[in-house]
Image (tube, grey):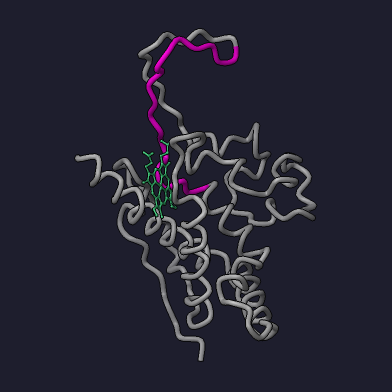
Amino acid sequence: MRNRDAKRLFSHETTACAIIWALVEIARHPDIQQRLREEITAARANQAIGESDASMINSLPYLHAFVLELFRLYPSIPLSSKEAKRNLVICDQFIPKGTQIQIPVYAMNRLQDIWGPSAAEFRPERWMKDSQAGETPDSVNKAADLKNLLTFGYGSRSCPGREFAPRVIKSFLVVLLSAFQFEADGENIEFATSLPTIRPMHGAPLYVRPIH
Ligand code: HEM
């Protein structure tokens, strides 16, 4: 794959995968869906004259927490590869120049040591600043942003779309949740194993009903 094609894939495919998993979790959790819709409806009703939709959408705390939880459980690129450009020591471990390093982002984002006993559960509340979820690390509660995740990489070569992608996903969800109700059809949706992105192996069958 050429470098330019790879970068195009990084932007479209990753965002599309995240939106699919967002709809899957919304359909699986009617309570979360309801809370998101209520937050969106209230914000629309109270939107100040002159306030842009973008500004309104980005001020919604539960939607923000939802998107962070989405990036935690469904990092579109689940495995990141790096090569050591010089000799390094990381956590007392000597790493010679040229070593290939695989960073298992998917696994790290689900580690119970970091995220507590509810690590495998989709719980947007863990990102809320006033969260009562005692098992959530303080650093997560205090920062409540992407710095706590490697979903977009980190450092000088991290994803330049890391601010843009959440905005795109939030905008999609605001439009979709205002118009449609999503329901799961009860089937367990499996991951596809093909890298570089994670997607549902056999599609994501959902029922979609207009609200009005
Ligand atoms: C959910 C959405 C997205 C995710 C999870 C994601 C994730 C990533 C990751 C993990 C990398 C590699 C970072 C590293 O090697 O440390 C990356 C690179 C990149 N991403 Fe994203 N990305 C997303 C959306 C986007 C969007 C919307 C754009 C463009 C508007 C974009 C543009 C790029 C580019 C150009 C690179 C290559 C950067 C470089 O090589 O220096 N990504 N992305």
Residue 116: x and y, percent? 68, 39
Question: Residue at position x 34%, y 48% from top?
Answer: 10
Q: Which residues are magenta?
A: 73-91
Asked if 127 appears above or below 117 in the picture, the reply is below
Question: Residue at position x 46%, y 62% from top?
Answer: 24
Q: Name the side, left or right, on which 6 lies relative to 61.
A: left
Magenta stretch: includes residue 148: no
Question: Residue at position x 56%, y 39% from top?
Answer: 110
Asked if 158 appears above or below 53 in the picture, the reply is above
The residue positioned farthest toward the bottom in the image shown: 212
Residue 11: x and y, percent? 36, 52
Between 73 and 53, the one lying in front of the other is 53
Between 147 and 110, the one lying in front of the other is 147
Residue 109 occupies which quadrant of the picture? top right
Between 56 and 68, the one lying in front of the other is 56
The residue positioned farthest toward the left in the image shown: 1
The residue positioned farthest toward the front in the image shown: 50
| Screen quadrant of the N terminus | top left
Magenta stretch: includes residue 78: yes
Residue 64: x and y, percent? 62, 60
Image mark count: 0
Residue 38: x and y, percent? 65, 77
Asked if 51 appears above or below 159 in the picture, the reply is below
Question: Residue at position x 50%, y 70% from top?
Answer: 171
Q: Name the side, left or right, on which 155 lies relative to 190.
A: right
